[in-house]
Image (cartoon, grey):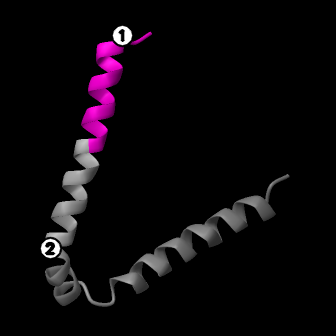
Amino acid sequence: MFTTGQLVFAGVFIVVFVAVMIYVYRKDLPLHKKYYKGSYWILLAFLLFIGVLLAIKLLTKD
């Protein structure tokens, strides 16, 4: 389905992309800690909300 060159390109692209994203995140980490303090609570509330919706869906299934 894919040629060897395409697979090599995709693999190199993914590795480089992830490495750059990690580098950029680490560089901005002090800013994240300063401006996004407490954002884990929002993530937790969002995941809890999704869990409640999933539970309702599974419990009301015929």
Q: Specify the label residue 3 is tagged with.
A: 1
* Classed neighbour count for the residue bearing mark 1: other residues with Cα under 10 Å, few (<14), some (14–19), many (≥20): few
| Circle nearer the viewer, 2 or 1 | 1
Q: Is residue 44 above or below residue 26?
A: below
Magenta part of the chain: 1-15
Screen quadrant of the N terminus: top left
Residue wearing tag 2: 28
* Classed neighbour count for the residue bearing mark 2: other residues with Cα under 10 Å, few (<14), some (14–19), many (≥20): few
Give residue 18's position: percent from left, percent from top: 28, 50
Q: Is residue 20 above or below residue 23?
A: above
Q: Secondary structure at mark 2?
A: helix
Which quadrant would residue 7 be assigned to in this image?
top left
Give residue 55's position: percent from left, percent from top: 71, 67
Q: Residue at x 56, y 67 (%)?
A: 50
Tell me whether circle 2 and circle 1 mark residues in contact (CB < 8 Å).
Answer: no
Q: Residue at x 25, y 60 (%)?
A: 22
Q: Amino acid at mark 1?
A: Thr
Asked whether, in this view, residue 28 is left or right of residue 49, the answer is: left
Q: In 3D space, how far apart are the residues under numbered discs 2 and 1 (Cα atoms)?
A: 38 Å
Please tell me which residue lies in front, 28 or 53.
28
